Image: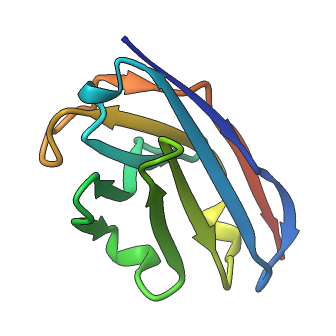
């Protein structure tokens, strides 16, 4: 099992920035890929960004150029730097982990953190 604990959500005005953090513990070998998903009210959950232990990265088109995912393997922590935030970025953001970068549904999930962007 992998346990994931997120922090860093909150309320910010459009154009502002937030940084999310997610610390992993437990069976770290099962967390080769770590990423961020989000779910807005009435919408399906979507992948925002993901990164492997080796540094492979992918982003949703909607956040490219604005969000940056990074990872500190020594701390088993993944970060999501979110800049130029828009009201449509408002959602609950979930940290997730899996053995496989390409897994269609990650195995392990955090409790979620709310990000609200006001216009």
Left or right side of 36 for 14: right
Across and down, in percent, residue 12 comes to 86, 68
Instruction: Work out whether residue 89 or residue 77 is closer to the camera in this orientation and state it.
Output: 77
Q: Is residue 45 above or below residue 116?
A: above
The residue at the point 74 percent across, 67 percent down is: 18
Across and down, in percent, residue 28 comes to 35, 27
The residue at the point 19 percent across, 33 percent down is: 99
Furthest-front residue in view? 74
Residue 93 can be seen in this image: yes
Give the quarter of the figure containing the N terminus: top left
Q: Is residue 106 above or below residue 54?
A: above
The residue at the point 36 percent across, 45 percent down is: 34
Residue 42 can be seen in this image: no
Residue 6 appears in which quarter of the rendering? top right
Across and down, in percent, residue 67 comes to 52, 75
Left or right side of 103 for 9: right
Q: Is residue 40 above or below residue 117?
A: above
Across and down, in percent, residue 65 comes to 46, 88
Q: Is residue 52 above or below residue 69?
A: above
Left or right side of 25 for 28: left
Instruction: Work out whether residue 33 or residue 15 is closer to the camera in this orientation and state it.
Output: 33
Give the quarter of the figure containing the C terminus: bottom right
Left or right side of 63 for 8: right
């Amino acid at each position: 099992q992998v346990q994931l604990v997120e922090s860093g959500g909150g309320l910010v005005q459009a154009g502002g920035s937030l940084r999310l953090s997610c610390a992993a513990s437990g069976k770290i070998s099962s967390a080769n890929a770590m990423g961020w998903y989000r779910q807005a009210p009435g919408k399906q959950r979507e992948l925002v960004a993901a990164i492997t232990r080796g540094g492979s990265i992918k982003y949703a088109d909607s956040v490219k150029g604005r969000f940056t995912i990074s990872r500190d393997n020594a701390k088993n922590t993944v970060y999501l730097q979110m800049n130029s935030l828009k009201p449509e970025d408002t959602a609950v953001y979930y940290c997730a982990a899996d053995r496989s970068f390409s897994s269609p549904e990650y195995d392990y999930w955090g409790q979620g953190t709310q990000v609200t962007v006001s216009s």
